[in-house]
Image (cartoon, helix red, strand yellow):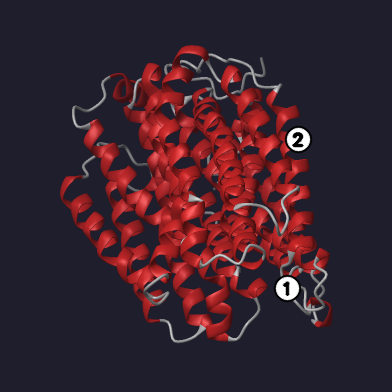
Amino acid sequence: MSTANVATTSSEQSSAPPRSGLLIGVLVVSAFVMILNETILSVALRDLSVDFDIPTSTTQWLTSGFLLTMAVVIPTTGFLLERFTPRGIFLASLSMFSLGTLISGLAPTFGVLMAGRVVQACGTAVMLPLLMTSVMRLVPVARRGATMGTITIVIAVAPAIGPTIGGAVLSSLDWRWMFWIVLPLSVAALIVGAVWLRLDSTVRKVRLDLMSVLLSAVGFGGLLYGLSAFGESGAAQTSLPAWVPVAVGAAALVVFVWRQTRLQRQDRALLDLRPFGYRSFVVALILTALLFVCLLGISAILLPLYLQTVLHTSTFVSGLAVLPGGLALGLLGRPVGVLFDRVGARPLVIPGALAMALSLWLFAILGAGSSLLAVIGIHVLLMVGFGLMMTPLMTESLGVLPDHLHSHGSAILSTLQQVAGAFGTAVFVTVTALASSAPSGAPDVTGLRAAFVVSGCIGVLAVITAFFVRRTEPTPSSRTDARPSLH
């Protein structure tokens, strides 16, 4: 990006539009409705298995496939945010999401339902980087933490309460109503955005590198498909061993990274990787990945399975059980953001990681005789830990980057969140199936406990990594040097 473009961006940021609060509000509400659909089907996995006569490890693709699609699409958003206006991206995003919701609600087979979820995910993927990039452009540095705290409600609380809403719907209605209820909300958000969303922006003609798109899709798709295949019942009888797509995906990602490093020299990278040159960005990214592995893997997969298969609760009760934790996470968002603006990330992230690790190990000691109140209490502690970590990590990771890398930094952050979430669901389902004492690999207390132990080990890694977080002053918006600072 040229010095002139950076100067223009700096000027725009220092004089935020008078309606910036309204613009961000429209984006937040829209993204909340969309992200809610990541996990709303998690409590319906058992019902869908029966309806479509397929194993639970296959129906979990409705969640992990949603996340996987987002991981494939999000790397292109750095390009999209430079090439098209925010208004155009917003309208395209919500239109795709609404179409996918309609397809899912009408789906006669599992394949059609999966296709609808993929279309939903394509629309959702673009919204997250658009939201974060808009905040970095519109909100002064001194108030970014508080505003990012509001975004935490979208990124974390929406998927956290998805099972609650899903359980409430299933208690009296068919699973299709999960989509019929969401559809009018998405259409309403589309109409409101079409009327109110006006954000001045400068676009530049960047050529899309199709090879990078292909490498990204094969890389992330192969990696997550292979991981999920390990959990498929009867996977050993399949003609394609699960390690093959994992190896192909890993190789494609290596080539993808190599190609981006070459293209970014010409300012043509699909996903500019220069944010990885900033130490604080990398540390925050690692912690965010560990957090999202457990956030979606525990709240959306393991906990509902434990409540329904071990404690034998109804889908409605299992959905309500995760509601207090989701509310705690939402209530902490803005206060934690305000604290971040005052004290920085380290004093918040370390206790958050400790609470996360403790709660995950407490989950590992649960059994068939555990009380529902104990499960709810541990889940609340887990969400409090997440709440202390999430807003500081998002703000810290993007705040250290110069303006012209914000769109690519947010794309990297959003991609990693979805990959980590899909990785968590795949790994935990795989561990549960492999460790289960049931011949069919159906979830039981033994398999679920093994998966919780794995999550506890991830929590320990998060605690260790948290001690590498340090307070770093945001990079001045007037900076024009594209070279990263490692100090």
Residue 113 visible (yes or no): yes
Q: In this view, does 243 lie to the left or right of 173?
A: right
Q: Which of 404 and 38 is in front in this view?
A: 38
Looking at the rendering, which quadrant does residue 458 occupy?
A: top right
Label 1, secondary structure: give it: loop
Name the residue located 66 percent from the left edge and 24 percent from the top edge. Answer: 279
- Real-space Cα distance between discs 1 and 2? 29 Å
* Foreground: disc 1 or disc 2: 1
Which residue is under mark 1?
442
Q: Residue 425, labelled with which disc?
A: none
Can you say whether 273 is above or below 125 in the image?
above
What is the x, y in percent for residue 82?
41, 43
Decide which of tag 1 and tag 2 comes sooner along the chain. 1
Q: Which of 226 and 335 is in front in this view?
A: 335
- What residue would you read off at disc 2? 461
Amino acid type, residue under disc 1 in the picture: Ala
As shown in the figure, which amino acid type bears the numbered disc 2? Leu
Secondary-structure class at tag 2: helix
Q: Which residue lies furthest to the left in this view?
A: 195
Where residue 178 appears, as percent x and y from the top left, is: 38, 68
Q: Give the residue at x 64% y 57%.
A: 302
Q: Is residue 282 left or right of residue 398?
A: right
Determine crowd level at label 2: few under 14, some 14-19, many 20+ residues with C-alpha closer than 10 A.
some
Does residue 74 lie above or below 183 as drawn? above
